[in-house]
Image (spheres, helix red, strand yellow):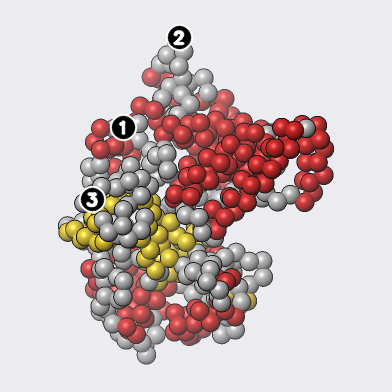
Amino acid sequence: MVPNGDHMTLGCCNHRKYMPVAKHLYSDHVIMETLQWILTHLVCHTCFKRHEKLHRCGQCKFAHYCDRTCQKDAWMNHKTECSAIKKRGVAPNENIRLAARILWRIEREGGGLTEGCLVSIDSLQNHVEHFGEEEKKELRMDLESFLEFWPPESKQFGMQYISHILGVINCNGFTLSDQRGLQAVGVGIFPNLCLVNHDCWPNCTVIFNNGNHEAVRSMFHTQMRIELRVLSKISVGEELTVSYIDFLNVSEDRKQQLKKQYYFDCTCEHCQKGIKDDLMLALKEGNEKPSQEVVKEVIQFSKETMKKVDKARSDGVYHEVVKLCRECLTRQEPVLGETNIYLLRILSILSEVLSYLQLFNEASGYSKQMVDGYLKLYHPKNAQLGMALMRAGVTHWHAGLIEAGHGMLCKAYAILLVTHGPTHPITKDLEAMRVQSEMELRMFQQNEFMYYQMREAALKNQKIQMMPEPTNEPSVGLFQKKQ
């Protein structure tokens, strides 16, 4: 943890700023956020919580809320947007709505620094000058869509400034997740966070905390915020870094992804030295080493299978996903090592889908293989590692493997306490699971026969539930990139 009063460096492209840090996390309140269009009727537009029955805005018929409290909290940002959507008849995509919300806020409050903000949105990089022809074409289309949506009675901004805002969103938009952190539901802009540079092996992580909107009148009420959380002890003057992308790619692929999405060349130690690249491309150990031709064929087959799997997942044909993954594993296992990323990607999908189909015994074996590989690759305090351990632990619990499941839940809890903090909704969920599995483990150790008898009865009213429907997003990333 960082000692009180120490200073740490926040990096931002061509300049550096210093800030005093009093705690082990730094909070940046939401400057503006908006939901993905496809989820607008499933998630509250204020607290981003999923509800079966949401209350719809009576004017625009677009925004949905948990209750009157959430609707009232949203009114300042939604008021002008509500009128614009009602007049246009349909809402534009989330990037256009976010740009409009930012400009309405500038219209209300001006473009200067707000309280607690270290940098204004005017100062953020937009990288418009680095756009290729396809990106420039998309920008022109976004400009046309924005101008159709922007009301004539609102303050009029120049095309160059609107392009700047859209460019900032494209390069700096932060992915917002639902309260359980399992699905990306929107995009937001957090200027202070944009000061933090990238490292593939960072010393911090960024978590979106939805806050506790159910305790409005109590001391436990907290608002939505971005938390920059420290992963380990940081020295005085050391730069704070986060990873913009998932680490689970070889260094050359990560560098290409960062160059394409964020327009910079990664010079971190892991990319320069290719650290863990050998593990990510590991081959099966044994007396006979597979030939390069065989390895090339298996990797190509894996890539082609992933495309088919993505199509089957998007169509919701999960039994086809299972069939494709099993066929791929049959080709991979004699050739690829346990930490090979092509093998791990198939194991991740297969364990997730089998769990969703409630084939827990088979899913538990694949999830064990997956987390064993992840533990050798990821940073020991990586949030995605913690989430994978949690899912694997729940899968083992459902399979009746209480000892292994409890061990995974405990490891996951230790990681998420650091990456998410004790007040995050998902950490609270995990703590409840850990306590429940610990109680069941004690019962199992005292009388195994009685444990299984009681387990069968309890399954009709089980408490541990963590099996959401599989999506094409294997994990919630940090920074949103327009698709």
- Residue under the image location 50 percent in, 79 percent down: 73
Q: Is residue 123 among the parts visible in the rendering? A: yes
Q: Nearer the viewer, residue 239 or 104?
A: 239
Where residue 188 sits: x, y (%)? 40, 66
Whether residue 205 is situated above or below residue 191 in the rendered picture: above
Which circle's residue, 1 or 3, is located before the other in the chain?
A: 3
- x and y, in percent, of residue 368 in the image: 57, 32
Question: Which one is closest to the eye, mark 1 or mark 3?
Answer: 3
- Residue type at mark 2 is Asn
Earlier sequence position, callout 3 versus callout 2: 3
* As drawn, 320 above or below 191: above
Q: Which residue is mark 1?
A: 275
Real-space Cα distance between discs 3 and 2?
A: 50 Å
Q: Nearer the viewer, residue 159 or 263?
A: 263
Q: Do tag 1 and tag 3 residues touch (Cβ < 8 Å)?
A: no
Q: Which residue is mark 3?
A: 236
Farthest-out residue, front:
4
> Residue 96 at what x, y percent from top left?
40, 71
Q: Which tag is nearer the camera, tag 3 or tag 2?
A: 3
> Which image quadrant is residue 29 in?
bottom left
Q: Which mark is residue 253?
A: none
Real-space Cα separation, disc 1 to disc 3, in angstroms: 26 Å
| Element type at mark 3 | loop
Viewer-nearest residue: 483 or 125: 125
Looking at the image, which residue is at 35% across and 27% down?
278
Q: Is residue 160 left or right of residue 407?
A: left
Residue indicated by mark 2: 287
